Amino acid sequence: MREVGVRKIVVLSLLLLAGCGHFESEEKADASSLLERSRELIVEQDIDNAMEFAVQALSEADESNDKAMTAEALCTVSTIDLLATRDAQSWEKACEAEQIARSNRLPRPLCEALILKGRVCSYSEISEDTGRNDEAIGYLSEAYQVSNDNNLFREHVQACYHLSEIYVNKNRWNKKLVPYFYQKAEEYLGEGERMASEKGFTDLSRRSIPFRIRFFRQGGKINDAIDYCKRCLTISDPSDWLTKAQIYDQLTSLYGDQGKTEMALDNHRSYVHAMQMYMRGKSDKYLQDLENQYAYLVKQHQIERTRRILLVVLALLLMSLVLIWQSLRYNRKISRQKAAIEEADASKKNLLEAISSDLVDVTSLSGVNEMMELARNSHSMDEDEIRQSVEKLVGESASLSEEVSKYFYKLILHRKKAVEQSGLTERELEVLRLSAQGLSAAQIADILHISTRTVTNHKQNIYVKMGVNSTSEMVFKAKEAGLL
């Protein structure tokens, strides 16, 4: 029972050692969380890091064969390329996302891809001769319809904003304002602003500001644009320095158009201050992230140190348990061997006492000699044959009593088992018995009528089988095992 308990402890220790290495394992970020982080960085205008997270999200989506997430990741990469003025790469990713969305009937990524293609076409309208505004209207109109049919409100608002932008752009190269284009721009912009307000899309409501200002400026409504900027400043979040900077920048340009240099200069100072505050907040956030990362690394270092200490302690404990276990097994083996020797000695002692007290005629030892001869030949007999032979000798001998025969029977059985366990042959047993009497190899060879070399070979075989290196050690071990 104690040995079983030790084994259980050893197994538990091994399990603990195997499980220690998982203390600091972190859950791998999925594509959705990576995309969310990328979009947050886009808002913060951290383009490089945003692209890194977007590419990781795209890789995760490809590995999991998530078509919807793959299309969304492609749209995010396309958006980042567009912000970085990489129009060709943005167009390529948007087309790939559109193909996946159409093949798998994914309306949301399809809307995003169409809006991106419309934006690329719009931004390519850098001269009067390029003529890609109509192509942009085609993509954005489809996005407008798909988002409306599938109740994709955020995408619908974005389609409205960019359609308004396209119709404003169509008046860019006209010497005289085209009322139809200007009216369409106002309709789409108004629809997008109303839906963003009704659905509580605060971020999309803020995004309408540059579209509305661009609309006013294209129509020559400079004062309306200035009033709109001032209203936006009053209702904007005090901590949203990026939005304030964009509004101050627009006011600087608007006052410049009116020739109000002082007002333009004041708003430019406000723009610079707002950008400084925005960058300061961004730096503070970056420093906070560094502090959090440092704290995390310190914690991980402490965990790793604790893990190593625990590993060492468990290893020492395991080694101690193994040593205790082996010690217990060795002690039990020694105890069993000692008990067997004591039992054999007791049997021999009892046998000698019985023989000395029960012999009828001391000079007549023929029965004893025959018993000893039977013991030497017992390895080739079974227990029934041994019992019958002992009973026969007792019946024929006048010098042996029935009590003595019982001790001889036990002694013969004990010697038979010892011989079987030793693996010695009959000839090797004879060599062993004669060697125990102190005879030399030459004397043993004369008695057995074999050569001295053969006797030496037999002794060498006995050494190997018994695990000894000398005659004295061989005789001692043979007596312990009951072979003599």
Image (cartoon, rainbow, N blue to C red):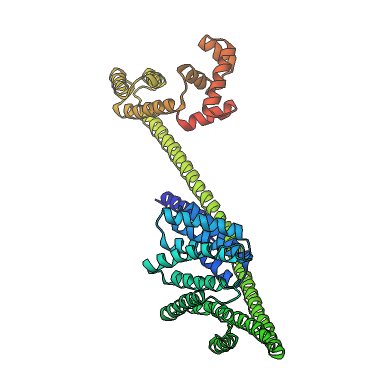
Q: Residue furthest front?
A: 176
Examine the rendered structure and indicate whether residue 404 appears above or below residue 99. above
Depth check: give the residue in front, 324 or 349: 324
Examine the rendered structure and indicate whether residue 64 appears above or below residue 446. below
x, y (%) of residue 4? 41, 50
Count of marks placed on residues: 0
Depth check: give the residue in front, 312 or 76: 76
Query: Is residue 270 toward the left or the right of residue 330 in the image?
Result: right
Depth check: give the residue in front, 328 or 232: 232
Query: Is residue 31 toward the left or the right of residue 251 in the image?
Result: left
Examine the rendered structure and indicate whether residue 154 appears above or below residue 96. below
Q: Residue at x 49, y 30 (%)?
A: 479
Q: Residue at x 31, y 26 (%)?
A: 401
Depth check: give the residue in front, 260 or 296: 260
Residue 348 appearing in the image: yes
Residue 150 appearing in the image: no
x, y (%) of residue 455? 56, 15
x, y (%) of residue 196? 45, 78
Examine the rendered structure and indicate whether residue 10 appears above or below residue 452. below
x, y (%) of residue 305? 61, 63
* Quarter assignment of residue 360: top left
